[in-house]
Structure formats: structure tokens, C-alpha cells
Image (spheres, rainbow, N blue to C red):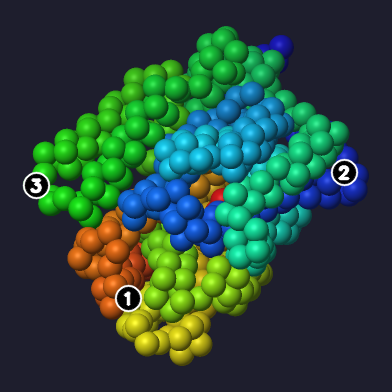
Amino acid sequence: MSNAPPELRTEPPPPTRGAAWTGMVLLIACSAQFMVVLDVAIVNMALPDMKASLGLSAAGQQWIVNAYTLAFAGLLLLGGRAADLVGARRTFLAGLSTFTAASLACGLADNGATLIAARAVQGIGGAVLAPATLTLIMTTFTEPRARARAMGAWSSVNGVGGAAGSVIGGLLTEYSSWRWVFYVNIPIGIAILTAALLHAPAVPAASATASASGASAGPAGPAGPAAPAGHGGRGGLGRLDLPGALSVTVGLTALVYGIISTASSSWTSPHVWAALAVGIALLAVFVVVESKVAAPLVPLAVLRRRTLAIANLVMIGLGSAMFAMWFLLSLYMQQVLGCSALRTGLYFLPSCLAVVIGARISTHLVRRTGPRPLLVTGMGLSTFGFLWLSGITVGGSFATGVAAPFVLCALGLGLAMLPVTAAATAGVDRREAGLASGLVNTSRQVGGALGLAILATIASRTAGGSSSPGAQALTAGYGHAFLVAALFTACAALGSLLLPGRPDQAGPGPAGPGPTPGGPR
């Protein structure tokens, strides 16, 4: 047991391995990320068929997406903390197994309620899996340039998975059944699980390492929150903040339910007010819990870091617009323009490619420019694209009315996602990698859930709130929603001006990564 003062103790680096082994770890992490992103894109393509097959309402259609998103958002921090406390390998295997099993349950669902419940379980698996993939990379690649390349590859998988998901989802929906958009995850999940059991590193958990070195609890100081290991001698799982995870997940669900309910009820309806009040109250409980428990999901002191707090607010604004974009455009193209699921998937390819291009540009520039210029540029492009999309018409076409603004929005997303993640994780100690990555991904998911609820509700109310609105009403609703999405991205661009403008201002701390690119789930 080390007798060094706590401030001088560091976690031993993982064992040095060869390039073939590190390449295998990167392949495992990227493949898992690919599967998660593939699932999201596939589901967007199949939404109209799911609605028709299971007799879902417009609100039920939203819940197919939001059941996953809310479970993911509410439990991502728990998943990130689990990766820190019990090890990235264990959490990776648990999340992957849950996600794969839930995919089978989704495919077998024979009614809307069962499908929505299974999607929530998928979200739980994804919440455990996603931060573990990033933590595996951050703990395997410790040299800044190698980490930048690895995280750039991991981020680019989002665009590749989105492109593949759009086409595969269209093919499966067109020529088979929407159920196969879930079944396809099963062989992929089993293959990744086998590879991870053989090759994923058993890096010591932060809790175990700190305990072995004799670390004690104490304030984090300006560099960041205290290591989770400092909270007594219980096992890692015993220090997971389950009350915090439960309160934030149920609180967000109630808040989103209240917002979605306004599509068919007035804001003054008792059940709307009750849902909103419960949601706000539980989120307040979450803040209180985080200030009281020994090992909080979000040590409130971490939010005193200006760059981290601003980056997460920007991510909320970004996610609010971008989640709804894919959802609403898929419905517009199939329900108004009359595109098949396959054609819609093919039409999504240019935008997916634009995300990849934006991500690659950010990978090469963020270390030289810092996050602010790329974020402002990316959100500016997306704002212009959404303003353009707000003018869609019933008699338009993809080529003349959708393609160019869609690509602009996606290019802006690709440019912005890497630097906002870099800003949020800059200077974070390696033992807190799960917390930082979980927090920034949670912000994106929270923004996505709230944004989808708000924008889809605006679209529905503008369309008259009927169960089967006409093409003209649907188009007007989508146009209004895109106009509000432009407001979200404009606010994100303004918020980005408060982030560091020079690379050295977002440079690495003593044990943390520099402004290396990362990405969303």
C-alpha cells in the first residue's frame, strides 16, 4: 500500500500491448458503437410500418424513439460511473448482452406497449454500453495523437452506422418486415460479444486501483471531482447512485410525457400539469440526491468547470434539433412525398456522408483551432439548413426541397459534435473518463428526448392534432418544427462563443486527454 500523499498518487497505466491488440480493442469498441447507431437509423426508416402494423397513434410512434432515448439518457451517467467503478470490460459485456437480448424482444413484440417496453430495455443496455466503448478507447490509447486518431475513428462510425442503417432499414422494411430491423442486431451482438470476451482489456477499475494505492476521500480541487474510490471500502457496485439514476430517469420521462400530451390536450389540462409538475419535482430531487450521496452520478462541483458546463449546455441545444431532424424528415419523405422506406434510406445517404466529412474535418482541425470556431461554424450551417427546411412544400421533391438543406444540417452536426465533446472532456483525469463521457452523451440524449417531444408536438399541433391529418397539414407542421429547430441550433452557436477559442485554453490536464475529438452515441 502506497504511503504517498493522495495528490501525488496516480492510477497505474494499463499494460503496454502491441499494435495488433490495440487495433482489436478499437475494432471492438467501434463495432459496438456501430451496432447502436445502426439500430437508431434502422428504426427511423421503419416507423411508418410499425405504426401501421401495431395500430400506434402519432404519440405512440414518438414513444418508440423516446422510450429508448429516455432510458439511455437517464442511465448513461450510471453506465459511465459503472465503467469507472467496476471496469470498462464488465460494463461493456453487460451492456452488449442486454442490448442484444432486448433487440430480440423488440422483434417479437405483438403490440405497441410491448415494443415500447422492449425499446426502454434496449436503452438501458445502450446506456451501459456506450460510455464503456469510449472508456475502453481512452484507457487503451494514452498517447495524445494515437488517442485522437482512435476517437476520430470511433466518432466517424456514427456516420457510417447511420448510412448503413438507413439503407439496411429501407431494404428490410421494404422486402421483409419491420421486425428484422431489430433481429439484425442479434448476430452482430453475438460476434462482438465473442470478440470482447477474447480480447477486451481487463483494465483495473478506478475503485480497485485507488483502493490499492490507499487513496482517501477528498475534494477534487480545480482539476475535477474526487475519484469515486474515495468513498469507503464497499465494492464498486455498492457505490452506484441508484436513487439519482431513478429520479432523473423517471423525472425526464414524466416531463416528456407532459410535453407530448399537449399534442392532444391543452396546456391547462390537469394531467398535463400533473406530469410536468412530477417531472420537475423529480429532477429537483435528483439535484438534492447528488448533493447528499457519497458517490453521486454527477458531483455538483464538476459543473463549476466553466468549459464543461457550457459544452454540455451546447450539446443539449445541438441534440434537441438533430434528433428531431432525422425523425421528422423520415416521416415527411414517406408520408408526404410518398417515398418508399428503401428510397428514403437511400436519400439519407448524402447527409450521413456529410456527418462523416464534418467529423473528419474536425478531427484534423480541432487541435489547432480549439473547439469554438468549429462549433460556431457547424451550428451556423445547421441553423441555415433548418431555416431552409422550414420552407418545405407538399408539391416539392427531395432533390429540390430537401437534399441541400439536409446536407447542410448534417455537415454542421459533423463539424460540431467532435469539438463539443473535446471541450467537455478536456483536462479530465483518466479515472473520471466514464463520468465525463457519460455526462456529455447524457446531455445529447436529454436534449434529443426533449427536442423530439417539443418539435414533434409542435408539428402535430400545427397539423391540427387529428389522428390522420392531410399532406398539407403535415407539411405545415413539419415546417414549423424545423423553424424552432433553427432556434435551438442558433442558441447552441451563441453558447459556443463562451467556449475556449485557442487550443491551449482547452489543453489537457496532468492526467487527462487534450482537446481530442470524440463523438455522440
Give the residue type at disc 1.
Ala
- Looking at the rendered image, the disc whose residue lies closer to the viewer, 1 or 3, is 1
Alpha-carbon distance for marks 2 and 3? 59 Å
Query: Does residue 415 appear in the picture of this structure?
Result: no
Q: Amino acid at mark 3?
A: Thr
User: What's under tag 2, amino acid-wise?
Assistant: Trp
Q: Which mark is residue 207?
A: none
In the rendered view, tell whether residue 43 sits above or below residue 134.
below
Question: Which of labels 2 and 1 is toward the front?
Answer: 1
Q: Nearer the viewer, residue 59 or 80?
A: 59
Badge 1 density bin: few <14, some 14–19, many ≥20, Cα 10 Å: some
User: Element type at marker 3?
Assistant: loop
Q: What residue is shown with label 1?
A: 471
Q: Secondary structure at mark 1?
A: helix
CA distance for labels 2 and 1: 54 Å
Label 2: few (<14), some (14–19) or many (≥20) C-alpha neighbours in 10 Å: some
Residue extending furthest toward the bottom:
400
For discs 2 and 3, the disc positioned in front in the rendered view: 3
Q: Mark 2 vs mark 3: which is more N-terminal?
A: 2
Please tell me which of labels 1 and 3 falls first in the chain: 3
Residue at image location 54% in from the left, 27% down from the top: 227
Label disc, if present, on residue 21 of the rendered structure: 2
The residue shown at (37%, 87%) is 395
Point out which mark residue 268 bears: 3
Q: Position of residue 510 (x, y in %)?
A: 62, 42
- Foreground pick, 455 / 497: 455
The image shows residue 105 at horizontal and vertical percentages of 58, 36
